[in-house]
């Protein structure tokens, strides 16, 4: 798949690289696996002198041997001496950059925590010693969110405050997903195809590439690719999160499965698991940043009327349909699970249609707040409320797959509760459906 999007990240990388021609710079890039970090880095420095070191969980001396080979190959010169510790090799690279400007990429950097934790303090000492008189453009990349946050944002850690720039790489926007569909499916596609692409990829570059390369652009085609022998996606949730959650992964997985199945309040989750999950929810939101707590628009920050949602579309799908039916998948009964997805898809996709339009409105740049509203016991639900506080305007909308099922008069009646907060605002009521998915934001 060709390279898409990432204009702001490419611009930042180029600006930082140029600054590194005068004195060394450190950029940290964090993003979940498959999001496209390595592809972005490769694109950013494709015409530059770059060393790329991928850190795998193996003996430090063996890693250094691989890195020395990469150094010798890229610089077309023998590397003097023998390096069994990364800190010694890093010092050699810093000394080399006193006369030669280049980019050094350390990918999956958090793995040093399992190889040699001393690397972090050793690097800090060397960086502080050499950075002002060297010309290395250091790019540090990681995918285990909690570890990368700890290494660079915990004041007690040696590398805290050393990064000049930080990038949290996000999924592709809905505009980019539509562009991919247009490029790889030129015969045309329906709104429901784009919605399915959005739901199953969540804008994650690797999943978009997988479906695009295999010409999977309808829901049925995508499900056939997910639910088959040797599928790369069936074990994806485990591969992404077990290392993050460690020994308590079973409890975290159970909570996420319930949230994906619309048990979105703490009381609903605790009634099923029969245990206090407050600490787990707090970590999922604030430490792992996998879920978010959503309150009705205009609610106070501490309000208890909270719903928990999984931010990653693919992970939501995985916990709703894959993890929940692992027994059937383990015996190869793929058609059984696909039929469940197709049975539930209309209701399930409706929730993501709401999310799609919230993201679409956000792209316009016209609103200061975008959210949802509901009263206690989920009464008077309103799918979408978008507010422009500067112009004193508000959009209140209902979202359904079928436009014929939307009643704007009933929507106005349900809006009475929030109208008190919008006194003096110009209100527009709208209906959004599949018919509006392909319209430009």
Image: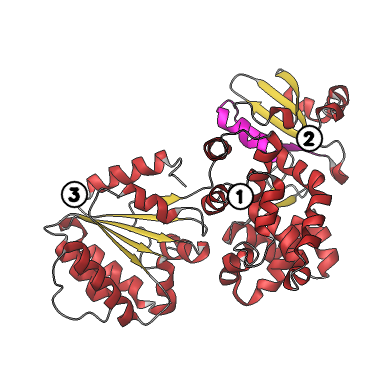
Specify the label residue 201 is tagged with.
Answer: 1
Q: Position of residue 310 (x, y in %)?
A: 67, 53
Residues at discs 3 and 2 in contact (Cβ within 8 Å): no
Rendered position, 423 above or below 375: above
**Of 270 and 410, the residue lying toward us:** 410
Of the 4 image quadrants, the one containing the C terminus is top right
Toward the viewer: 327 or 377?
A: 327
Task: Please state which of the two labelled residues, at mark 3 or mark 1, is closer to the viewer.
Answer: 1
Task: State the separation of the CA atoms marked 1 and 2.
Answer: 20 Å
- Residue at 19% across / 64% down in the picture? 94
Badge 1 element: helix
Name the residue located 71 percent from the left edge and 31 percent from the top edge. Answer: 385
Report which quarter residue 119 is drawn in: bottom left
Gap between marks 3 and 1, in whole Å?
A: 38 Å
The secondary element bearing badge 3 is classed as: loop
Figure check: 361 above or below 350: above
The residue nearer to you, when weighing 174 against 341, is 341
Q: What residue lies at 30% left-to-right and 67% top-to-bottom? A: 124
Q: Residue 48 at x, y = what percent?
A: 24, 50
Q: Name the residue under label 3.
A: 21
Ranked by sequence position, the earlier of labels 1 and 2 is 1
Q: Relative to 105, is 37 on the left or the right?
A: right
Left/right placement of residue 389 relative to residue 130 reads: right
Which dot, 3 or 2, sits closer to the camera? 2
Is residue 23 located in the magenta-colored stretch of the structure? no
Residue picked out by circle 2: 401
Question: Label 2 neighbourhood size at 10 Å, few (<14), some (14-19), many (20+)?
Answer: many
52 horizontally vs 207: left or right: left
Q: Is-magenta flag for residue 367?
A: yes
> Magenta residues?
354-374
């Amino acid at each position: 798949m060709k390279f898409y999007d990432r204009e702001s990240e490419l611009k930042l990388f180029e600006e930082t690289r140029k600054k590194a021609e005068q004195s060394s710079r450190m950029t940290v890039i964090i993003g979940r696996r498959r999001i496209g970090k390595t592809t972005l880095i490769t694109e950013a420095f494709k015409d530059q002198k770059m060393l790329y070191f991928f850190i795998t969980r193996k003996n430090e001396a063996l890693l250094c041997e691989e890195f020395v080979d990469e150094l010798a190959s890229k610089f077309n010169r023998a590397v003097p001496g023998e390096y069994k510790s990364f800190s010694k090799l890093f010092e050699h690279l810093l000394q080399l950059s006193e006369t030669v400007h280049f980019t050094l990429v350390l990918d999956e950097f958090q793995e040093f925590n399992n190889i040699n934790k001393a690397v972090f303090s050793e690097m800090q000492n060397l960086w502080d010693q050499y950075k002002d008189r060297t010309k290395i453009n250091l790019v540090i990349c990681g995918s285990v969110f909690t570890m990368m946050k700890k290494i660079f944002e915990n004041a007690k850690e040696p590398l805290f405050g050393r990064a000049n720039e930080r990038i949290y790489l996000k999924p592709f926007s809905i505009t980019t997903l539509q562009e991919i569909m247009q490029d790889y499916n030129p015969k045309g596609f329906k709104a429901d195809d784009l919605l399915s692409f959005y739901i199953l990829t969540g804008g994650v570059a690797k999943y978009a590439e997988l479906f695009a390369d295999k010409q999977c652009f309808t829901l049925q085609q995508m499900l056939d690719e997910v639910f088959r022998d040797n599928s790369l996606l069936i074990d994806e949730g485990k591969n992404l999160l077990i290392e993050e959650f460690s020994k308590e992964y079973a409890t975290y997985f159970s909570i996420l499965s319930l949230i994906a199945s619309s048990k979105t309040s703490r009381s609903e989750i605790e009634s099923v698991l029969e245990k206090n999950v407050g600490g787990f929810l707090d970590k999922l939101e604030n430490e792992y940043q996998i879920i978010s707590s959503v309150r009705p628009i205009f609610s106070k920050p501490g309000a208890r009327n909270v719903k928990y949602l999984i931010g990653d579309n693919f992970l939501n799908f995985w916990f709703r349909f894959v993890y929940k039916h692992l027994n059937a998948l383990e015996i190869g009964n793929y058609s059984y699970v696909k039929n469940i997805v197709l049975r539930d898809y209309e209701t399930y996709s409706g929730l993501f249609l709401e999310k799609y339009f919230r993201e679409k409105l956000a792209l316009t740049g016209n609103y200061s707040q975008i959210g949802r509203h509901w009263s206690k016991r989920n009464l008077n639900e309103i799918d979408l409320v978008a507010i422009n506080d500067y112009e004193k305007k508000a959009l209140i909308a209902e979202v359904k797959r079928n436009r014929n099922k939307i009643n704007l008069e009933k929507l106005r009646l349900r809006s009475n509760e929030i109208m008190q907060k919008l006194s003096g605002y110009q209100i527009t009521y709208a209906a959004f459906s599949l018919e509006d998915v392909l319209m430009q934001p």
